[in-house]
Amino acid sequence: MNPARETDMRTQYLGLELDNPVVASASPLTGSADTLAQLEEAGVAAVVLPSLFEEQIEHEAMAIHQGLEFGAEITSEVFGGFFPELDSYNTGPDHYLDNLRRARTELSVPVIASLNGTSVGGWTHFAKVLENEGADALELNVYLVAADVAVSGAEVEDRYLQLVSSVREAVDIPLAVKVGPYFSSPGHMARRLADAGADGLVLFNRFYQPDLDLASLTTTPNLVLSIPTEMRLVLRWMAILHGRVDASLAATTGVHDAEAVVKLMLAGADVAMMTSALLNLGPGHVATVLDGVQRWFSDREYVSIDQARGSLSQLSSPDPSAFERANYMHALVSYST
């Protein structure tokens, strides 16, 4: 019996040519040179560095601004441009830039920098600094909780779009936008984000929920890693958006094993991003996942992942309603205790 022919695992994401669809998303693992090397050795196709936060950039910019102003009136030498203009001054956290430079030097896979912010402001210009330091692409992680009851949904969406447009104007490298699912019409918002300049969409951001400490009566952070079932929300919207949005599509949240990656490719994803599973099982888990993905596609004689991509999306499904209300009703009717 002839062995199954290996499937071509190559894919494209944000215009980048990748050897396979598994990407290490932002986490402590991608913030360490040692684990970055282990991820590449295990076969990861690209890495997303941990996010640099709007607050970090603005805090350092403010510290520099105060330092430049201190004593400015003591001597006349400061007048007439003795100090550099802040617009052209490197106000970004040096540690992040050092990590980016090192990753670009030591890795052969694409390195995607990440910015996390919620408002349009001077911090968005740091995107250009990341581009100049060699980032292959940029992921904008929009972590915005609309807690003001006076703010409408339309205002929230406009804020997203303004932020994306601002960063898009700052850089020429590909731009991905990582968003949550909490829009009244996620599909329409996805199209608007692409129109605003997003080359890719990352589905979905996980909004970590705070907890209450009953002993101290305080609010406490509560970080819980994802579980595999969380991938189903991503799977549904990946299938709905495939072929309907002019942007690359990345899946994240709940991607723990080869089966999840295969499902997401069939739904229409260009890449699958992993975090929690790698934190639990280590960088070497990438190799296990890739072996499983290769085995599934080659056993079914797929020539390439491109051949399979989107074959179970809503556009290709014989029953498109399965991704909408019909599936909900079927699940309720078919469930038995």
Image: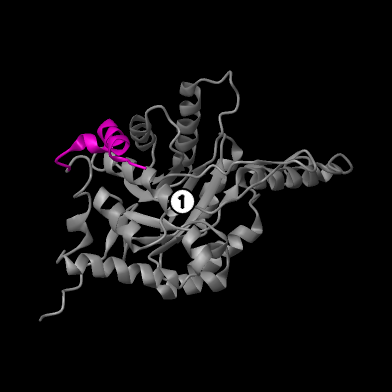
Query: Residue lying farthest bottom?
Result: 1
Main SS of residues in magenta: helix
Query: Residue lying farthest left?
Result: 1
* Residue drawn 28% across the image and 31% down it: 325
> Whole-percent x and y of residue 28?
57, 61
Residue 269 shown left or right of residue 282 in the figure: left
> Whole-percent x and y of residue 106?
49, 73
The region drawn magenta spans 317-337
Task: Identify which residue, 223 or 14, lies in the foreground.
Answer: 223
Residue 227: in magenta span = no
> Whole-percent x and y of residue 72?
83, 42
* Residue drawn 30% across the image and 51% down it: 269
The colour style of the image is one colour
Q: Above or below — where is 155 with respect to 108?
A: above
Q: Which residue is mark 1?
A: 138
* Residue drawn 66% across the image and 47% down it: 56
